[in-house]
Image (cartoon, rainbow, N blue to C red):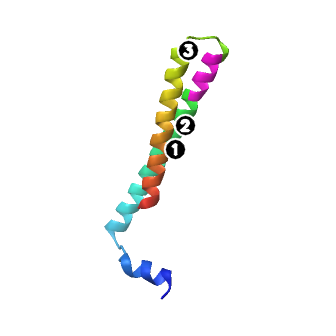
Amino acid sequence: MSTVSNVAAARPQQVGFRRVWRALKQLFYEITGAAFAVLAFGWLNAALRAWTKDAARWLIGVAVAVALLFVYFSLSSFRRARKL
């Protein structure tokens, strides 16, 4: 048996409102992931600016930590959208 037929047999075809709801959930997770990616980029930019201006090390560390947290949220949101 081919793998494609096994996957098709395992997941029933969604119709109507369930299909629209699944598409909306996937879109929500993708938009959320993109928003967190943009926020992570902004925090990394702030950390880089603080680094070049000789700001306090803890301020740079906080900005990098928040950026890493947003990167994690972004990746987990994109993975959740992919699982749907």
> Which residue is most to the left?
17
**What amino acid does circle 1 point to?**
Ala
Figure check: 5 above or below 62: below
What residue is shown with label 1? 34
Q: Position of residue 72 (x, y in %)?
A: 47, 41
**Label at residue 38:** 2
**Stretch of the chain drawn in magenta:** 44-51
Q: Position of residue 80 (x, y in %)?
A: 42, 54
Q: Magenta residues: mostly which secondary structure?
A: helix
- Identify the residue at image location x=63%, y=23%: 48
- Identify the residue at image location x=35%, y=61%: 21
Q: Dot 1 lies on which element?
A: helix
Q: Dot 3 lies on which element?
A: helix
Q: Position of residue 52 (x, y in %)?
A: 67, 16
Figure check: 65 above or below 49: below
**What amino acid does circle 2 point to?**
Val
What residue is shown with label 3? 57
